[in-house]
Image: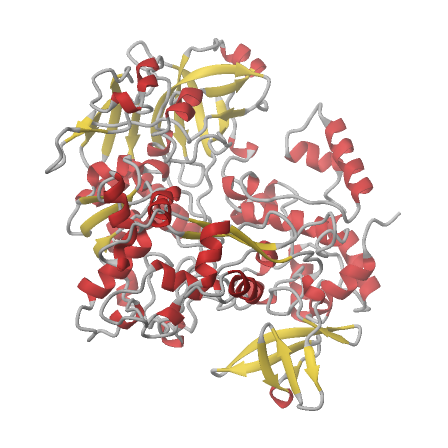
Amino acid sequence: KSLVDHKFVKNWVNWDKLMADDAYLKKMLEYGYIKSIPEKRDYPAFIEMLKEIYAPYTKEFVVKECKLEGQEDKLDELFDMIVDAGPRIATYLWRAGTIGHKGGWMNTRAGFLLMALVGAMAGDIGGVSWHHWHEISVGGKGDKATVAGKYPDKVDVWNELSWPPEYPLSTYEMSMILPHLLADEEWQKKWRSKGVMVPEKLAVWIPRMYNPVWINPDGFRWIDILKNEKKMEMTLNLSPTWSETNWFCDYVLPVGLAGERHDQQSSPTKPERWTAFRQPALRVALEKMGWKPKRPERATLEAHMKAGLGEIWEENEFFLNLLYYHVDPDGSLGIQKHAASKKDPSRPVTIAEYYDAAFSLLPNLLAVAKREYPNSEFPCYEYMRDHGAWTEETNIYRPQERELKIDKKNKTIEAHGHTYKADEVKQDDSGVLWVEHDGKKHSIGVEVDGKYYQGFHTPDKKLDFYVDWFANEWKWPEYGIPIYPRNKGERKKMTHIVTQVHHDFMTKENEFALNTIYRLSYNIHTRSVNSKHLMEISQNHNPVWIYTKDAERLGIKNREPVKVRIVDTVSNLESGYFIGMAIVTEATRPGVLACSHHAGRWKVKNAVDIPGFEHKLGVMGLGAPLFELKDDGKEASMTPKAGIKPMKPWQFKEYNKDLDNIWWDGLTGAWQNAVAPVHPDPIAGNHGWHQKVILEKAGENDKIGDIYVNYENNFKTFQVWRDTLTRPLEAGDTQRRPRWIKRPGAKLSDKAYSISIKS
């Protein structure tokens, strides 16, 4: 019995584009994906070709490739669940294979293939939805309240430190390699000689609610660059909590946590479009009691000072005030007008003005807010302030099948909120409707069975089994369809989609794959260390979990210290080691160690002096032991010096009396991220978190929490990943990146996207 939803696949998967591409079908033949080119190019021929392509991926293949010997029944169970569910499969592909491995993006693509074939991606009840169907994003769109009255003009400058020319398809900004690019002067010279003026330094760097030293791999490279004023001239951290990064920043400016700032927030949690409004609780409470700020453009700051929090800015007001009063005080740069209040140009726009304009973009909210707050100057802001959340639209199913509005009388077509003249709209052979704007084609809809629909958010408005632009223009033809190597020879050729911890690389009995990214759900990366109750759960504890029989085989006992050496499988260089506590368990797989990178916090002092502050400021006293740090610029080490203690001498203990009950010392955590090298995926650009490790018993003088890292080797590993695995932009390329990929977030001009590379 076929499990394929043929109606959905025929209508909404771009099979016809593949079957019409003779050149790519020939490539598939060359790659060995198919044995012959189909004579017919219709839908049944496509389905038969799929059967041939995926015939090798049998249950036996999966068992061998995924090391599931003895657990075949689990695959049978999973298959039965898929058969029973049909189109009612909902899954979430992110934190497992996708982000752990080199080529993890193909993991997601394989999952999408299954769900597309069974019709689970149709946007129907019980299936999978796209996040943008259900999210609302208006938080940065309050420009009508400013003097400018519109979003700033497109920027003409490209940022190669976020979007390097080796990674034109990266999904997000490649923040984890920022210090490596700044340190790599040979790389800078190479691209500058080709006419690409990559930056050599940063004048100002603001990490903002981000702890790069601790959470990123290769943390000592970050420390090295933060301390180097020739590379980062000034650094300031807008940080609601203390962090490891703060030790190395020029300025640490406290900003509010979630309950101390305004922030529009939306998540794709159900088939609705809804939004929430985070607010500074103390400010709202004071305003409800009749308090008013002296300067409305910094009301949150004044409220926090009034309530006793101190000089705690919220970022909205901080940046608006910074732009208005300091960056462009006379308006000559054309920046001030984007921060200036339309109501009162003598000051920055206020929170009420800005967010009222932003939320007014939601027509249903606007109608209700005006009705409920008829006398309000800012009805949408007041509604969201008082209610906290709003549902703009419900029952969002199959949005790709929303029909375009065609006005035959006026000869116009309305798509995605825009109205086009009918004679401006062209249709290609695959049914896609296009318009030209600024000399470029933009798809606005697609014809399916004689009707015109909005379609999916892809250039051809369908789900892309075959991605022609990826395969051709952007030079990755072998991965133009969902595929995976079938044998060791293909794994070497297709190394870009083979994990760096594949069992091909595990040749000795004490070599393991290390899973660093399983979630400690009560620890939010770097912001939970100040929560006494959350830290009591975790106690800065990240043991090395090891499968029972692996521990028996290696003679490792429960709670025994072990040395975990990290070795890269692309460069074959060793990074260093960390000492962790072994915990023997049935809850990890044979050959796989697990050590969460959500614990292993540290500090170099227990308190810091703040000018004008009556007392010393204690830092991370609930979850970070005191460590000694040594660093010579190429190699570094850390060792614990003192554990966490009850905070009896703390000057504010009357407000937190249970701080005397700290019974944990926090000395069972290790900062493993410092040892790990960066693994920038050659295509998607994300860091592949998993590491190959060699497991040994700890030495006589080793202590849990000790780390040693050769970060010069880590730098070489980064260069090998970048220079041997990527396919950079080259002479003849004219675009830095496909424009239809969502990022960069800032609006960029044609000039910014354009590139000219010398040969």
Residue shown at 82% from the left, 40% from the top: 84
| Placement of the C terminus among the 4 image quadrants | bottom left
Where residue 117 sits in the image (x, y, percent)?
75, 53
- Quadrant assignment, res 140: bottom left
Does any portion of residue 141 appear in the rendered image? no
Closer to us: 733 or 506 = 733
View extreme (left): residue? 612
| Horizontal arrangement in the rendering, residue 439 relative to residue 131 (left or right) | left
How has the structure been colored for display? secondary structure
| Horizontal arrangement in the rendering, residue 2 relative to residue 323 (left or right) | right
Where residue 645 sits in the image (x, y, percent)?
28, 15
Is 643 located above or below residue 425 in the figure? above
Labels in figure, total? 0
| Horizontal arrangement in the rendering, residue 606 relative to residue 392 (left or right) | left
Residue shown at 20% from the left, 39% from the top: 248
Where residue 589 sits in the image (x, y, percent)?
59, 24
Does any portion of residue 481 appear in the rendered image? yes
Is 210 located above or below residue 384 in the figure? above
- Quadrant assignment, res 568: top left
Residue shown at 39% from the left, 43% from the top: 258
Where residue 545 sits in the image (x, y, percent)?
50, 20
Is 465 located above or below residue 125 in the figure? below
| Horizontal arrangement in the rendering, residue 523 relative to residue 186 (left or right) | right
